[in-house]
Amino acid sequence: MEGPRTAAEVCGRVAGAPWRRRALEVVAALDLPDCWIGAGFVRAPVWDALHGFGNPTPLDDIDVVYHDPACLDPAAEATAEARLKELLPGLPWSVRNQARMHLRNGDRPYGSTADALCHWLETPTAVAVRLGPDRAPELLAPLGLDDLVDLVLRPTPHARAQRMAAFRQRVARKGWLKTWPKVRLECR
């Protein structure tokens, strides 16, 4: 299977599409603290490449995640989302401050966006990308890249310990195994 294997190759695959590069640029322009675009924005183009798909798989949303414990008001997220819709309309933006997401998930407070990603449900989704100070894409993968590039769908350690029912429901609801049939589900 040809496709991205390293962090640099994953970044290249994600930022290589002009619309994805533009999305990274407008998110960077928001200047939110510890801000990244994660989940399917990274996972889908990698899995598409590993499946040899010529056309990108549509995204349900574009997950913009940041960490700002100084402003936990959900209205700030709505303001950022509205700004993204102005700057780059027609995309399914979703903005969430990870400093408050622990409340929804019943976890201890997350100390950073990387910490929050470790509490997401599946390992190949717990990845994110942003433009660094030099405008080059940077990757955030606190649980590593192996599952993403090896086409393995597995619960994060946190999900395995505390949220397996939610993991199973999400896998069934998202239909990833039908969209990307080479993906292997491993629940151990």
Image (cartoon, grey):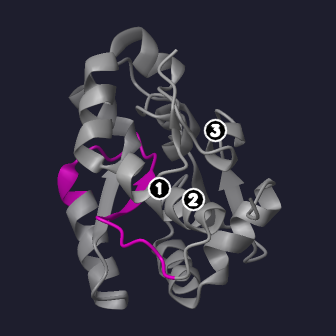
Q: In the rendering, at what x and y percent does residue 152 appear?
A: 58, 38
CB contact under 8 Å: marks 2 and 1: yes
Tag 1's secondary structure? loop
Of labels 1 and 3, earlier in sequence is: 3
Determine the residue positioned at 71% across, 39% down.
146
Q: In this view, does 15 lie above or below 155?
A: below
Q: Nearer the viewer, mark 1 or mark 3?
A: 1
Identify the disc placed on residue 47: 2
Please, what is the three-letter code of the amino acid marked with disc 3? Asp
For this rendering, which residue is in front, 125 or 119? 125
At a point 48% along the width and 77% down the height, the residue shown is 56
Of the residues shown, which amino acid type is indicated by label 2? Answer: Trp
Q: Earlier in the sequence, mark 2 or mark 1?
A: 2
Residue at the image position 22 percent from the left and 48 percent from the top:
73
76 displayed left or right of 52: left
Q: In this view, does 81 lie to the left or right of 19?
A: left
| Range of magenta residues | 55-76
Q: Does the magenta stretch include residue 69?
A: yes
- Reading the image, the residue beneath label 3 is 147
Overall secondary structure of the magenta section: loop
Q: Is residue 142 left or right of residue 6?
A: left
Q: Earlier in the sequence, mark 3 or mark 2?
A: 2
Report the Cα–Cα distance between label 3 and label 2: 11 Å
Q: Which mark is residue 180?
A: 1
